[in-house]
Amino acid sequence: MKELDCQACGACCTYAGDVAVYVTDTTVPKHLTRSVRGRSGYGSWEVNQGTRVMARKGCDSCAALSLKKGSYACRIYENRPAVCREFAPGSEECLAARKRAGLHIETSASDNATPDPF
């Protein structure tokens, strides 16, 4: 399987839902996050300026996601939240996000014996 490039894909950043930004994520720009206070089920997340979530754009993608010439890139990649850092390229979750986004994974000649599930 071809190595996946997070800075060219953006599948996990589109329709990601609420991406937690923990109090330990000190390098994430606060203006790209939002409070979860007052939202049902989230009240305990943000106590004394604790966990917040990444803000979203109108299309429901992460506010830090930028579309450049047909590819996606995270504007804060080096400063992204721990949740994003832990999301492994090629993992089951990654492949599911790529499938939801309609992205296919190229296979190498040596992978031809196994059909690409996408």
Image: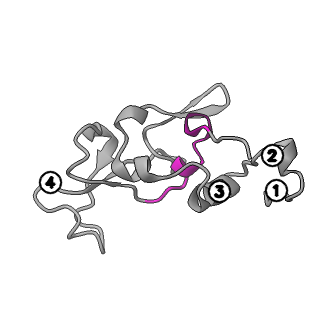
User: Where does residue 12 sit, x and y in percent of width and height?
Assistant: 55, 51
Label 3 element class: helix
**Which numbered circle lies on residue 49?**
4
Query: Colour scheme of this structure image?
Result: one colour
Question: Residue 45, relative to residue 112: is it above or below?
Answer: below
Name the amino acid type tagged 1. Answer: Asp
Nearer to us in this view, 91 or 43:
91
Q: Nearer the viewer, residue 69 or 79?
A: 79
Question: Residue 71 lies in what quarter of the image?
Answer: top right
The residue lying furthest to the left in this view is 48
Between marks 3 and 4 in the image, the one whose residue lies nearer the viewer? 3
Residue 3, by quadrant, is top right
Amino acid type at image mark 3: Leu
Can residue 36 be seen from the camera position used here?
yes
Q: Secondary structure at mark 1?
A: loop
Q: Give the class, few, some or many, for how many residues have Cα within 10 Å of label 2's Cα (few <14, many ≥20).
A: some
What percent of the width, then of the height, locates residue 88? Answer: 52, 51
**Residue 6 part of the magenta-drawn span:** yes
Residue ID for mark 1 = 116
Q: Is residue 86 above or below residue 79?
A: below
Residue 9 relative to residue 32: left or right: right
The residue singled out by tag 2 in the image is 107
In this rendering, would 45 be left or right of 117? Answer: left
- Gap between marks 3 and 4, in whole Å? 34 Å
Q: Earlier in the sequence, mark 3 or mark 1?
A: 3
Q: CA distance from mark 3 to mark 2?
A: 13 Å
Q: Earlier in the sequence, mark 1 or mark 4?
A: 4
| Residue behind mark 3 | 95
Label 2: which secondary element: loop
